[in-house]
Amino acid sequence: MEGMTDIICVVLGAFISIITTISLGCIQEHKKEIHYAKILYFDLQSIKDYLGTGPGKVGEYPDIRYNDNWQGVISEIDFLTDAQINALHMLYDSIYNYNKVFNQTEDMKKRKEYRSNVEYHFSDIQIKNLLDVIQKKCKLFE
């Protein structure tokens, strides 16, 4: 009888260990996803704030600052839809192109054209919905 109790204790201990390990892994993955979602949210808010300010000094459009690792951030967020991922790629590509033009030319017409392209991609409904989704999932500002 004593041997049977030992076996039950070992099996029960192994079962509890497995459940605990799986649970902690899921919790850590969720926290990691929320962390990256917050990074994306605040990066998008920064871009939104930049677009809302208009030109800085007279006749200048400063380059847009953004997270260089945006692709890595996006890849860590599982709740993004394909349409949202596509919209993010289009937005960040347009920002990259704008910054490249900004550093290569002083032609204000060209800068305005590329800036309006960034504004167009930022106004995509997928980006607007994404900001709301992240805000709810991460429980920001509650």
Image (cartoon, rainbow, N blue to C red):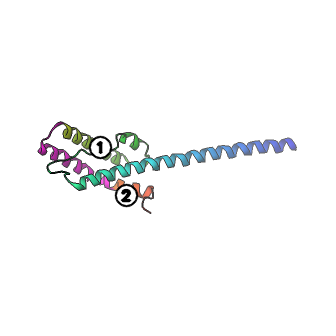
Q: Amino acid at mark 1?
A: Tyr
Residue range in magenta is 104-128
Q: Is residue 139 above or below residue 59?
A: below
Q: Is residue 88 magenta?
A: no
Give the residue at the far bottom of this rendering. 142
Q: What residue sits right under mark 1 in the picture?
A: 92
Q: Identify the residue shown where x is 49% and y is 46%.
A: 32
Task: Left or right? Give the position of 138 relative to 92.
Answer: right
Task: Left or right? Give the position of 123 relative to 9.
Answer: left
Residue toward you, 124 or 106: 106
Give the residue at the far front of this rendering. 57
Residue 5 at least partly seen: yes
Q: What residue sits right under mark 2 in the picture?
A: 132
How far apart are the alpha carbons under marks 2 and 1? 19 Å
Quarter of the figure with the C terminus: bottom left
Q: Could you say where residue 70 lies in the image, as x and y percent from the top left?
A: 36, 42
Residue toward you, 63 or 30: 63
Q: Is residue 105 magenta?
A: yes
Residue 80 at least partly seen: no
Q: Identify the residue shown where x is 18% and y is 36%.
A: 104
Crowd around label 1: few <14 · some 14–19 · many ≥20 (10 Å): many
